[in-house]
Each structure stands twice: as C-alpha cells, then as structure tokens.
Image (cartoon, rainbow, N blue to C red):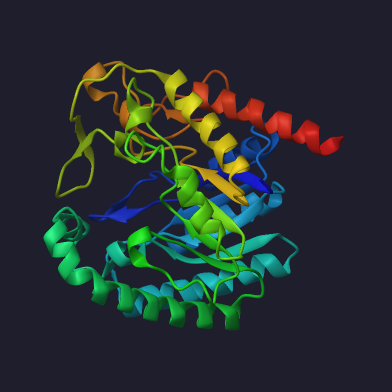
Amino acid sequence: MRAWGVTYDTGFTNAGTTTHEPFDPAVVAKDMRIIRDDLHADAVRITGGVAGRLEVAARHAAAAGLEVWYCPFTNDLTVDELLAFLLDAAERAERIRREGANVRFLTGSEISIMTVGLMPGATLSERAAVIADPARVREVLPRVQRETNALLGRAVAGARERFGGLVGYASLPMEAVDWTPFDFVATDTGYRDAGNAAALPASLAAMTSHGKPFAVTEFGCAPFAGAAERGSRSDIIGYDEHTARPVRLTETVERDESEQAAYLRELLDLYDAGGVDTAFVYTFATRHLPTSDDPERDFDRGGFGIVKVLPSGRTGTAYPAMPWEPKAAFHALAGYGRARARASAL
C-alpha cells in the first residue's frame, strides 16, 4: 500500500449544527502534527461541509507534512449549491497545492444521498428512509445514478479548470460511478462485517480492475464487543431528530477498545494484500460523541474515533491540553505507522 492515514472531520452539517464544535484551529494544528509525528501516517482525508474549515485544516495538514486529500462532505445542499461549493473548494485546494503541498482533490462524498434533488427527500432522514426501502430504491436508482454521474461529470470538469493535481471522488457502490474522467477510484464502503467478509477480497479486486489507483476512503468500527461483526452498522447512537444531537445509546454494549484496534489492523493488512493504493481509517475523532462517566451517556461507545473525546472543559493526560485521550486503536495504529516508517527507511 502506497499510503495510509485517517479521516479528519471538520464538521458535517445537519439540523443547523456540525459534528465538530467548537472548531479550534489551534487544536486542529496540534492534531495534524500528532497524526504525522505520533501515528506516522502518510496522509489525511479532510472532510466537512464548512468551506473555511476545510481550508484551515488542509493548511495545517500540509504544514505537518501530510499528503492532503481535500474532500468536501456536504449535506442538504441543492445540486447547484453543491457544484458551487465543490468548485470553490477546488480553488482553495489549488492555492495550497501551489504553495508546495501534496494535495489531491475529491469532488465530494456520497453525493447521491447527501444532496437535495438526487435521492428523493428534502432531508437526510427522509433520504435514508428511501434507502431503507428496497422496493423504493429499485424504483428510483436508475434515475439517481444518471443524475449523480451527470453532476460528477460537471464537477470534475470544473475542478480540473481550477485544480492542477489528481482528482477523485468518495463513492458509494449504488452510484455506479463512471470513473473515466477521474485519476483514481475511491469508495466510502471499505467496511468489513459478518455479511461481506468472505466476499471482500473479490470486491477489492473489482475496484482495482479499473486500471487506476484505488483508495478506501472510509473504514472502521465502534469500540464495543461485537462491533467488528457489524462494521459500519456499529453506530448505536440515537439522535434528536430536530437538533441532530446524541440523546441515547440505542442498546447496552460492553466497551472493548481492543476489538476496534484489531479490526483496523486486520483491514489495513487486507487492503495491503489486495492492491489498495491508499486507505483512510474512519475516523480520528467523533467530536459530537463525547465519553461520560455515566455509562448510559458514554456516546463514545458508538463513536468510530480512534481517540476518545472528553466532556467539555476536560483535557487529557496522555496529551495534556488536548480535549481527547487516545484509545487502544490509536496505539495500534501508531505501531503500524512506526513499522511502515522503519521498513521504508531500510
């Protein structure tokens, strides 16, 4: 595998808030240095739906010496709003690239379900309900695929007018993306679970058959016993539908950070063997899901972060002044990164 890293969420927007509050550029800068110096990661995928935050995080990542994957991840924008956002992001990414950073640009993430006007539904919850209905999905999918690919075609053409580096897109399988105009293939569905484990090597082979570098832009699980068998479905958080804030755990689970750590390491080895070019662990921190001494409010049990976000006002001991503590997954990935660094130095 050429490179590996983590996703860094600058704030997914929903119901008037984001998943990264407060957004402190000084903390972001320290996070990026830790990702580079302590995890020994090669790259970081920077996501979010606030234009200025994406640029701030990308600049700090570049300053830390990381390969930057500049990846807007928007929600509830119309098609025209999304296109404008992506083209503005391409210009911002190009300014950073021209200053000497190694930057790749992605024309969005999962846009078929995140954008108003592609999948039916005015809100994310309404569109998710469509996806949960197999008959409804079969009915609308041909149109969704056509319109998603038409939008991607406009986005990549506009991005190339503004950005001089490599261009890709963080896709979903149901989108049936035409990869012809892109420099690399990428998917947000790199998760392994009990249902797809046997077929995952073949799925990787199919993605690498396009003849272009293939990236897994998202994979991970939560830190509880049994989460590895669920993969992406190990999110056990119940949210308030009006505020998008966590309000409860949907089931009682036993914290098991070692299971999350083992899952990530196993998949990195699987991707390496399967010809993946780059893989990004999901995610560095789930800022909207802090831990708590009250087990029923310990939202981190359902959070995919490799660090445990502390309640407001508390700071860590392993990294003083930081609003998080490393989990077992953090230490496992640091060991993985050190081993890769040693091997590359030989």
Residue 117 x, y percent position in the rendering: 23, 74
Q: Nearer the viewer, residue 33 or 211?
A: 211
Name the spot of residue 212 as percent of width and height, x first: 61, 64
Quarter the C terminus occupies: top right
**Percent position of residue 62, x then y:** 67, 54
Q: Is residue 108 left or right of residue 182?
A: left
Residue drawn at (53%, 30%) of the image: 266
Q: How many marks?
A: 0
Task: Tell me what residue is drawn at x 20 percent, y 57 percent.
Answer: 131
Q: Above or below — where is 115 with respect to 151? A: above
Question: Depth check: 276 or 127 in front?
Answer: 276
Q: Is residue 16 visible?
A: yes
Which image quadrant: the N terminus?
top right
Residue depicted at 53% across the width and 52% down the height = 205
Q: Position of residue 48 (x, y in %)?
A: 43, 56
Please state which of residues 256 and 190 is positioned toward the viewer in this rendering.
190
Instruction: Check the image and report above or below for 149 versus 74.
Output: below
Query: Which residue is pictured at 55% across the width and 30% down the height?
Result: 265
Q: Is residue 3 above or below residue 286?
A: below
Quarter occupied by residue 257: top left
Residue 320 visible at all: no
